[in-house]
Amino acid sequence: MAKKITLFISATLLTMTIFSGHAIATVTTITLSFVGETNTLAFMGVSQGRDEANIQGMFLGQRYSFTGDVASSTAIFAAVGPYKLRQLSISYPNKAIFNLIAKDNELRTECLPNVLHIIPSELMLADAVAQWHKKQPGEQVRAQTWHPSFKKYAASQLNARFTQSSNHKMDDEAWAGWAAVKLLSDSIGRSQITDPLPLLQFLKTQLAFDGQKGIALDFRQTGQLRQPLLLINNNKIVGEAPVRGVANTINLDSLGITRCLKSPSPPNNGVHNEIN
Amino acid sequence: MKLINAVILSALIFSPLAGAKSTGRIFVTNEKGNTVSVINGSTHQIEATIMIGKRPRGIGISPDGKEVYVAVSEENKMVVFDPQSLEILREFDVGDDPEAFAVHPNGHIYISNEDSAKATVINPTSGKIIAEIPVGIEPEGVAVSPDGKFVIITSESTNMLHVIAVPENKVVSNILVGARPRAATFTKNSKFAYATAEIGGEVIKVNVATGAVIQRISLGNDKAKPKDILISKDGKKLYVAGGRLNQVLVLDANTLEVLRGIPVGKRVWGLAMSRDGKRIYSTNGVSSNVSVINTDINQVIATVNVGRFPWGIVIDD
């Protein structure tokens, strides 16, 4: 709650306006680098986010483009496994690296200082299913980040936009790619910060992002994006987690690990229970 | 007594609706009922229910009070009916998935096209498009300034208020606000506007001419997902539909402090105020009813059951 107040105050100070819709005098170019396979939904999601960021940029004087030069980029969008992700974290310590596909719990408890996990961890997904089972014992469900039939909170609009531009249905990794660029561009628009390191700090401490999931999203100290999850049975959405009646629906920390472990340690199934 | 009569008489003569006799009716679109409920403004009884089309949402009335417009979202059209006879007069195309709109004092309709990142200006008499104005992603709320010189469009996924100058129909400023801005309202002098940010849970005050954000306040309740916003006739209070908070919040328009919450039905989104400012009506989507608020005491004095998922509301007074 204290964090929310800080956010409000700083957002007030950072108010800005640009006149005359399309005739912006100076345009700042922000370069994004993507690491991973480009024939994936994660990349299509990043592309969708870039296109949408450019619509906002049209009004605020920013242009977002991809670069192959990772070192010079403003931020890195990574659709890679944990080994490569750790390497990127060490190689580029002063910029945000968005993890779009790796769900490993250890990546969260390690608290890599510059890695922001958009995709939920395995434990978040497991906790969502466990909550659902308390309400509906015996129902076989899977937890997902996103679903192409999700409609609430203007999710249907996002699904329609993505399908129109990519010819694919939006899945978890596509949403993660879209969300990563969108929350970056939203933060740049608000803060006018384009230097990678201050931007990373802004993202970690001041985010209130509308991921079209009905609640403002921000990052845990582990680098994980707090977010509601969807419960799917037979390819249909049956519920949302945190599950109403089982957990507080506005406390997103009932899903997954919330704190860092002091040092990297082997997997421990009891960890999140101790913390909660 | 004579003085009072004179005041009433002059009010009648100079009323902008002097040309058409007002019905006093309240019209409500029912998003899932596919109908418009017609409420008697004095008795708060349902007078009629009009079958209007699939997913009616935005609703507005012409400046002369002779026509009511309804955005029928899933049929991509605007349906026009007579507030007196309740007969459907005609319909016209308004692009994909029309949702919120406002009627300008010059008679033109400003509508947000949610799926195409633009606002469209339409002449409802001819059905012709007068202008298309590029705005942010998922444009939603539309507000017209009392002096008619400005229109604000909120873009939900770009988090902006776009200020459009009329009659030029050009964007003159883009104001970045909290997450998912949904609705806006102008002060009487047209110099300032207030907006709600649904996901941000905020109310924002802006200077229309400069585009500066003057004040911004968090409603301080995680359930408060504000939608519609109205300003009282004296300009001293704001009324904000609190969404899942199931309350209409009353704010001090000067400090933006929340003065009280008026419990209404579930998922309150739409608001309308009577011309004299004495009544506010809220559409409570999940409860399928409308709450009638007396603004002297800020309490609900009647609840009217309407169709399924009431959304938009307009008063013919």
Image (cartoon, coloured by chain):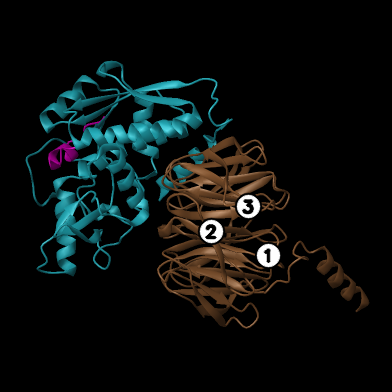
Disc 1 designates what residue?
A: B65
Quick check: can you spot residue A222? no
Spot the cyan chain and give its letter. A
Within the image, what quadrant is residue B48 found in?
bottom right
Disc 2 designates what residue?
A: B228
Disc 3 designates what residue?
A: B255
| N-terminal-most mark, 2 or 3 | 2
Position of the C terminus of chain B by quadrant: bottom right
Q: Position of residue A103 (x, y in %)?
A: 15, 41
Amino acid of disc 3: Thr
Residues packed near mark 1 inside 10 Å, few (<14), some (14 to 19) or many (20 plus) = many
- In the image, A142 versus B63, the foreground residue is B63
Amino acid of disc 2: Asp
Distance in Å between CA atoms under marks 2 and 3: 19 Å
Q: Colour of chain B?
A: brown
Which element carries disc 2, helix, strand or loop?
loop
Distance in Å between CA atoms under marks 3 and 1: 35 Å
Q: Chain of mark 1?
A: B
Which element carries disc 3, helix, strand or loop?
loop
Q: Chain of mark 3?
A: B
- In the image, B246 versus A254, the foreground residue is B246
Position of the N terminus of chain B by quadrant: bottom right
Amino acid of disc 1: Gly
B282 is within the stretch colored magenta: no
| N-terminal-most mark, 3 or 1 | 1
Taking B286 as reference, is B131 left or right?
right
Same chain for the residues at labels 2 and 1, yes or no? yes
Task: Give the residues drawn in magenta, as a range.
Answer: A101-114
Residues packed near mark 2 inside 10 Å, few (<14), some (14 to 19) or many (20 plus) = many
- In the image, B124 versus B316, the foreground residue is B124
